[in-house]
Image (tube, rainbow, N blue to C red):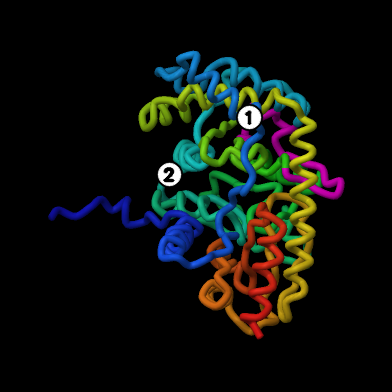
Amino acid sequence: MRPLSKLTNGLVGQPMLEILTTVTAMEAAGTKVYRFEVGDSDFDAHPHIVDATKAALDAGHTRYVGSMGIEPLRQSIRGYIERGWGFLPDLEQIVVAPSNSLIDFAVRCVADPGDEVIFTDPGFPSYFAVTNYLGIRDVRVPVHESNGFRINPDDLEARITEKTRLLIVNTPQNPTGAVMTADEAARIAAIAKKHQLWVLSDEMYSENLYDGAIHHSPAVFDQCREQTIILHGFSKGFSMSGWRLGYAVGPAALMAKIGLMFNTIYTCVPPFIQYAGISALEGDRSLMRQRVEHYRQLRDVMVGALNEIPGVSCPTPKGAIYAFPNIKGTGLSSQAFAKTVLEKAGVATVPGTCFGPSGEGYVRFCYLREETLIREACAKMKLALQ
């Protein structure tokens, strides 16, 4: 057989999905597994979103549409950005596509092999999965528990070289739950402007904020017209992971290129799914507030139960949907801890090293699960680690 392309040698994928495959096989064999590995919710999308999907199917919204997204959804996104970010983007600044694919498209549109992209460590694995296969050098900025895992803009600027093309920031952050401050957002925007760099601001979890935390974005300083791209979607805030619906807001010329790339590879997001997105953005916000309050309660249960396990210390995250406990006191590495609790307690989690070398000594739990499952899983881990 002829060899595959050199490009494919760099494909590494998402480690969480590899763990999901292992866990699914265990369940198929009859093993009970407490699943905290994937950033998904055990709770369904709000009923009006499901109803909108059904209505769109019944109305025949099943054919090709424009690759940038249907205009009604893009108009809804414009309004959503105006309400939440304080500026109204042009229609041409918005492209609709699965969020994870937008990371790939954005990186490919602004950087070439040999260029550099800067992001945090620990950070979302798709960032380095994309740069790795494209031959782009990833430059990591370690974030630390002592600073609430927030990025220090000075550390970021110190890593900029003449090869740097893109900064990727993420708030609230996966896997740590860190939330950027207003000053940090302003300084990152200023650094990008000073060095003439693109910024991909991953704000997927902006709906998932707790205890009065406020969402701050570097995008407000250029209103996504010059250098900043907002990456957003519906999976996390609206419990719509299976819809695979997301969008980017950025400079019009860049969005046109991303739209063309999406056109080439995927054609369009199914229109009936896009109508579900309209319902999500324009639906009853009281349902969202109730859901977020429930998530806060689950976060507190998870953090409290983890802190009862000897050798485990879990800070309280201000955002996102994950707990990221420090497990150094157990004497186990991140990989060994995850292996032990899976084999002895049936608890699936993600080693911190899946998010970068600085994740050593930590593991990630997605706490959007039933409270009883969280308590049972933590009790079983406590026994397994004795």
Residue 364, quarter of the rendered image: bottom right
Q: Label 2's element?
A: loop
Residue 217 pos. (x, y %): 73, 39
Question: Along the line of sight, which residue is nearer the eye, 356 or 349?
Answer: 349
Q: Which residue is mark 1?
A: 226
For residue 165, say whether it is visible: yes
Return the residue found at the far front.
Answer: 30
Placement of the N terminus among the 4 image quadrants: bottom left
Look at the image and give the residue range highlighted in magenta: 208-231
Question: What residue sits 64% from the left and 70% below the top?
Answer: 362
Residue at 67% across, 67% down: 376
Residue 213 within the segment the image draws in magenta = yes
Q: Is residue 283 left or right of residue 29?
A: right
For image coordinates 63% across by 17% down, the residue present is 75
Between 40 and 266, the one lying in front of the other is 40
Specify the principal SS of the magenta part: loop
Amino acid tagged 1 = Glu
> Dot 2 corresponds to which residue?
112
Residue type, label 2: Asp
Q: Residue at the spot x=76%, y=43% of the render? A: 292
